[in-house]
Image (tube, rainbow, N blue to C red):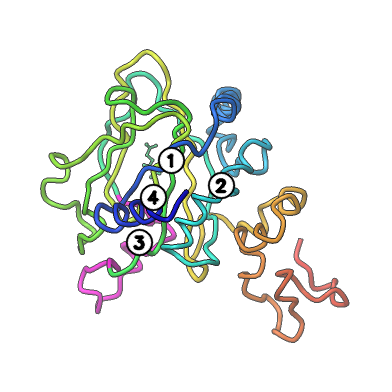
Amino acid sequence: MNQDTFDRHCESFTSDGYTILPDLLTTKECAAARRELETRYPDRARGSFECLFNKARIFERFYQLPDLVRLIRHFIGLDALLSAIYGSVVQPGEGGRGLHSDGAITGHNREASMAPADEGRRVTSHPMAVNVVFCLNAFTESNGATQLVPGSHKYPSLDIPDGAYENAITAVAAEGSAIVFDVNTWHGTTRNRTDNPRYAVLSPWRRRWTKCEYEMARVVKQEVLERAGVDGRIIFGVEAQPPYTESWQWDRENGRPKPDLADLERG
Ligand SMILES: O=C(O)CCC(=O)C(=O)O
């Protein structure tokens, strides 16, 4: 991506709270990812859609796309952490259940974590986290595409902004695109009025010093981490783990007790 295009995406993200990056995944990659979701769909209540990077090689691509990672790091830091990767399928007749903003469970939009002195204002000065929706098939006006409310990332209250439903825009996007948005941005799925499922992968990212949805450094399989190389150690937060020993006993780089203190390792 050239600098002008990158700048344009940054401007959209800053002013609207989201942007759409086209052509991140090839037709073949989208088909492979869709097949995985199709196979895993019946077992999703038992976790088959969670931590997809551990389950099929195709999902390792999703955090190794240079244009995407560049944009994420521009907004939430060079040491940004992958917070989760999970599947999302909107079946015919599903979707359209409403709008929400993210980060309400482990993030800065968690109502119970609001301090009295916050006076009901969430953090809107800077993006605290980014979410990514990968479009594994084309997102259209009628097939359950994501809708987003432009500018709602700057809305200070945790409540839904006035006129959100009237102002929401459906993210029409080609297969292989990704919708990248500030987690403050109000969004949701639209109703799938077609006869075919809508396939997506959701991939939220967090600032290094906030809590992710999973303890990724402990969840990620060793072989997956190794394949991600040096960058993987940053993305999965291996070095970001706080010690559970005294600091002189802790190997910060590897996120575990020092090798000669292996008896302190937790299973
Ligand atoms: O699947 C979608 O279109 C929206 C995803 C979503 O609502 C979320 O990640 O919070």
Label 1: which residue?
178
Q: Are marks 1 and 2 in contact (CB under 8 Å)?
A: yes
Q: Secondary structure at mark 4?
A: helix
Magenta stretch, main secondary structure class: loop
Percent across and percent down for residue 25 are: 53, 35
Given this view, does label 4 or label 2 mark the residue nearer the observer? Answer: 4
Q: Residue at x 24, y 79 (%)?
A: 117
Label 4: which residue?
5
Q: Secondary structure at mark 2?
A: loop
- Sequence-wise, the earlier of marks 4 and 1 is 4
Where residue 65 is drawn, which disc sits there?
A: 2
Q: Are marks 4 and 1 in contact (CB under 8 Å)?
A: no
Judge by depth and name the residue closer to the eye, 208 or 16. Answer: 16
The amino acid type of the residue labelled 4 equals Thr
CA gap between label 4 and label 2 equals 16 Å
The amino acid type of the residue labelled 3 equals Arg
Does the magenta run of residues contain 22? no
Does the magenta run of residues contain 117? yes
Residue 140 figure quarter: top left
Given this view, does label 4 or label 3 mark the residue nearer the observer? Answer: 4
Q: Are marks 4 and 2 in contact (CB under 8 Å)?
A: no
Q: Are marks 1 and 3 in contact (CB under 8 Å)?
A: no
